[in-house]
Amino acid sequence: MAHREKVANPIATESEESEFYRRQGPLMEYILKGPADQLFKIEKVPGPPARPYLSPELVRCGRCGDEVMKSCARVREGQLICAGCPGGF
Ligand SMILES: [Zn+2]
């Protein structure tokens, strides 16, 4: 499974997550500073864009016990950790 999928799910280890963000650095730099006419295709569309899908699945933080959206949790030492706990970011 690709690091991106593991980070998104979230099942990536801390080192896999660090490697993912290290590799993403140059691409993020290009997206943030690259020429808009090369990054975007601007055209009229027939209606409003679809709303993004957000998973409502909740999981319990393995450290503080708070409920957190699964997509916002991180895996640390085999546990799902919320952003408010040490190591959650
Ligand atoms: Zn927590």
Image (cartoon, rainbow, N blue to C red):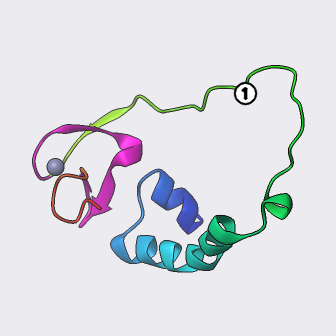
At 49% across and 60% down in the image, what residue appears? 6
Q: Is mark 1 within 8 Å of ligand 1?
A: no
Residue 40 vs residue 50, the one in the foreground = 40
Is the C terminus in the top left, top right, bottom left or bottom right quadrant? bottom left
Q: Position of residue 60 (x, y in %)?
A: 21, 40
Q: Position of residue 25 (x, y in %)?
A: 56, 77
Residue range highlighted in magenta: 63-81
Residue type at numbered disc 1: Pro
At 85% across and 63% down in the image, what residue appears? 38
Q: Position of residue 13 (x, y in %)?
A: 37, 69
Quadrant of the rendered image containing residue 3? bottom right
At 67% across and 65% down in the image, what residue appears? 31
Residue 40 vs residue 81, the one in the foreground = 40
- Pointer 1 residue: 49
At 66% across and 70% down in the image, what residue appears? 33
Question: How many numbered discs?
Answer: 1
Quadrant of the rendered image containing residue 16? bottom left
Mark 1 element type: loop
Question: Can you say whether 59 is above or below 36 in the image?
Answer: above
Residue 44 is left or right of residue 83, and the answer is: right
Is the N terminus in the top left, top right, bottom left or bottom right quadrant? bottom right
